[in-house]
Amino acid sequence: MVTLQIAALDVDDPSEAQRVVDAFAAADAVDRPWHPGFPAAVVQVLATHGWDGDPELFFLGRDADGTVVGAGWAVLPTRDNLNAALVGVRVVPAHRGKGVGSAFVEHLERVAAAAGRTKLFGGGPESDAGRRFAEAHGYAVASVGMTRRVDLGGVSAEAVQAAFDEAEPHAREYELVRLAGPLPTELMEAYVEAVSAINDAPLDDLDVDDEVFDGDRVRAYEQGQLLSGHRLYRVLARHRDTGAVAGHTVVAVETERSHLGDQHDTTVVGAHRGHRLGLLLKADMMRWLRDVEPELRTISTQNAASNAHMIAVNERLGYRVLGRSTEYQRDLPDTVPASSRGAGSVTGTA
């Protein structure tokens, strides 16, 4: 048993963000040792700006001695899924089995209830212990994800070119457009349709509504990447006759650790599928990044394990599995008492 104080992150104190990062890193060392972690500045950006404009609420849990024993977070969407909250908790391994995780779950549920949210989603690295914990708190498995990474040093330029050449004859009706940094304004209207195609990705049993995209959301996403210290690269497939953006792929490369890249969305609009555009886009991105990011060594991506098409594309390009993750969901019962969004603290024994 532990006496635990859970308090909202002080976003004006960089040392607080570093404590969140340290708690995550300690958990990752056990749960997903392949994960590279991230700088404390990213936590501050997420807490003030969010991924694409919806700030994340971060919380630190301390024991009676003031030692940080865990960190949690909640996202309350404002554009869609207005009944939902995305929540998560990471417990420092040395303090597991003492009720820290349970206390965090209860606190995050109170935060969600205070915001009028009735459906909760959370997840993390897959493990038997993690699944037992989630199910014991009323969360059901909704989706299983796979994290993959490509080692650019282990995949030859010739192999990537071969994949591009394989796809290119099927896509004669399309031209590829490479864009670094913010999207040109004149492309925004057509681009939003391609971004929205992410709603067609497999959801398994996740009970979520479609995400709503517009130009403001795209700009908020771009700003979040810039503030987080990432260089942004896009490749678009544009239909030659109509000018429609048929698909896109996006990679963000870290500025401070320029050997690390993250694959963000890759989508193809339904009306343009069947032309091998997914493979063409991702192969061209890899060709481009070899030229403009010479220090880049790896690109990581995550897909639902059921997304057979995108998995086949990734494996064709040399991506290999690092680990699995599990997403859970729960309808919030009416009996959960509401509390503030975390401006203050909650103390209890767990």
Image: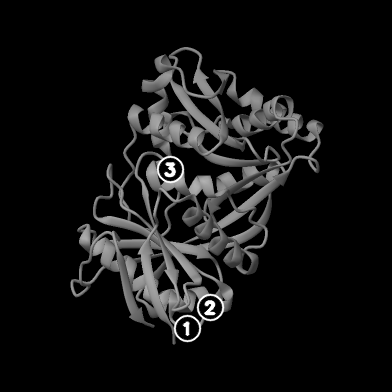
Q: Counting residues from the N terminus, which is met first, the one under dot 3 or under dot 2? A: 3
- Secondary element under disc 2, as helix, strand or loop, is helix
- Marks 3 and 2: CB-CB under 8 Å? no
Does the rendering let one see residue 135? yes
Q: Position of residue 236 (x, y in %)?
A: 53, 24
Mark 2 is on which residue type? His
Tell me how far mark 3 sits from mark 2, CA to CA.
Answer: 29 Å
Which residue has dot 1 on it?
Answer: 98
Q: Position of residue 263 (x, y in %)?
A: 58, 41
Tell me how far mark 1 sits from mark 2, CA to CA.
Answer: 6 Å
- Secondary element under disc 3, as helix, strand or loop, is loop
Q: Counting residues from the N terminus, which is met first, the one under dot 3 or under dot 1? A: 3
Marker disc for residue 95: 2
Which residue has dot 3 on it?
Answer: 51
Image vertical order of residue 64 relative to residue 209, above or below: below
Q: Nearer the viewer, residue 84 or 61?
A: 61
Mark 3 is on which residue type? Trp
Mark 1 is on which residue type? Lys
Q: Nearer the viewer, residue 291 or 310?
A: 291
- Marks 1 and 2: CB-CB under 8 Å? yes
Residue drawn at x 62%, y 36% as measured from the top left = 253
Residue drawn at x 47%, y 26% as measured from the top left = 246
